[in-house]
């Protein structure tokens, strides 16, 4: 099994099992109360949600690239501004965390992650994160999951303002950390984003089929795939020990 110098991972659905519900009426009731507590009064939870969706749509429409990623901190700030309330960065950060907590139904680290990361570190490998994610949500969650110091580099779509599978976000990671595509393995649970962006650079990839993966298409599959949730095979696929790499 080939070994690599650098191992690039997607986050949600790959390392982390997550379920959020941003349509939950209770989320918007609690967020309305949160905004009111800080002086921004909306007529109803429905009015707040409508304003949020309108601002998100406007931010997305401001860039013609369909893979443009908006920055939700700007949306939370604008929701205060529409009611004449100035919001500093601490309040925006707290609002984002509150929103995420209220919308999250499940958040857990897959059990293979920390053992595999320890093995990669012991073998002298570098570990990177490339995720379609909002930094205002992801950075606190990395701390909560014990992954805040797990990576040698992190690129999130909200910071890059572009999402996978755009080659721009992978190019940014490679340039920022001076990586060569042939020395990297991309691991993710989404064929159309994680595996597709690796293919754009001729990079080897490992597809992990998890609860949030879409339908499997062999024509879009990467170099290797694990579809049976037998995570005991991952060390061999990462080139960390002898094993059967068949999938």
Image (tube, grey):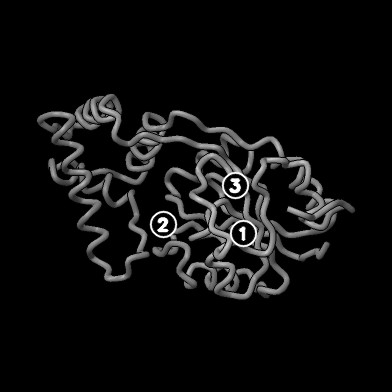
- Is 56 displayed left or right of 83 in the figure? right
* Residue annotated with mark 2: 158
Q: Position of residue 117 (x, y in %)?
A: 74, 47
Residue density around tag 1, few if under 14, some if 14–19, many if 20 or more, within 10 Å: some
**Residue 1 location, quadrant:** bottom right
Q: Is residue 141 above or below residue 173?
A: above
Q: Position of residue 42 (x, y in %)?
A: 13, 33
Question: Quick one: 153 or 57, which is closer to the camera?
Answer: 57
Residue at the location (84% across, 55% down)? 123
**Residue 129 location, quadrant:** bottom right
The span from disc 1 to disc 3 (Cα, nearest Å) is: 24 Å
* Residue annotated with mark 1: 153
Q: Earlier in the sequence, mark 1 or mark 2?
A: 1
Q: Residue furthest right?
A: 242
For label 1, the SS is: strand
Q: Position of residue 133 (x, y in %)?
A: 45, 51
Q: Is residue 159 above or below residue 133?
A: below
The span from disc 2 to disc 3 (Cα, nearest Å) is: 25 Å
The span from disc 1 to disc 2 (Cα, nearest Å) is: 15 Å
Residue at the location (30% across, 29% down)? 24
Q: Residue furthest left?
A: 43
* Residue annotated with mark 3: 209
For label 3, the SS is: loop
Q: Earlier in the sequence, mark 2 or mark 3?
A: 2
């Amino acid at each position: 099994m080939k070994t690599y110098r650098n191992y690039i991972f997607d986050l949600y659905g790959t390392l982390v099992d997550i379920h959020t519900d941003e349509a939950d009426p209770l989320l918007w009731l609690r967020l309305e109360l949160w905004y009111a507590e800080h002086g921004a009064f909306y007529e109803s939870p429905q009015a707040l949600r409508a304003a949020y969706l309108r601002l998100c749509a406007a931010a997305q429409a401001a860039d013609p690239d369909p893979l443009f990623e908006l920055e939700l901190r700007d949306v939370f700030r604008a929701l205060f501004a529409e009611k004449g309330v100035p919001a500093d960065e601490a309040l925006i950060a707290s609002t984002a965390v509150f929103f995420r907590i209220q919308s999250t139904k499940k958040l857990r680290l897959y059990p293979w992650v920390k053992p595999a990361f320890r093995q990669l570190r012991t073998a002298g490998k570098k570990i990177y994160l490339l995720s379609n994610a909002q930094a205002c949500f992801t950075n606190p969650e990395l701390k909560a999951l014990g992954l805040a110091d797990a990576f040698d580099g992190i690129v999130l779509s909200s910071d890059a303002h572009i999402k996978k599978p755009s080659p721009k976000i992978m190019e940014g990671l490679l340039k920022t950390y001076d990586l060569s595509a042939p020395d990297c393995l991309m691991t993710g649970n989404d064929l159309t984003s994680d595996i597709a962006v690796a293919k754009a650079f001729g990079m080897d990839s490992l597809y992990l089929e998890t609860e949030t993966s879409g339908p499997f298409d062999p024509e879009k599959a990467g170099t290797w795939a694990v579809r049976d949730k037998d995570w005991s095979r991952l060390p061999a696929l990462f080139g960390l020990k002898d094993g059967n790499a068949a999938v």
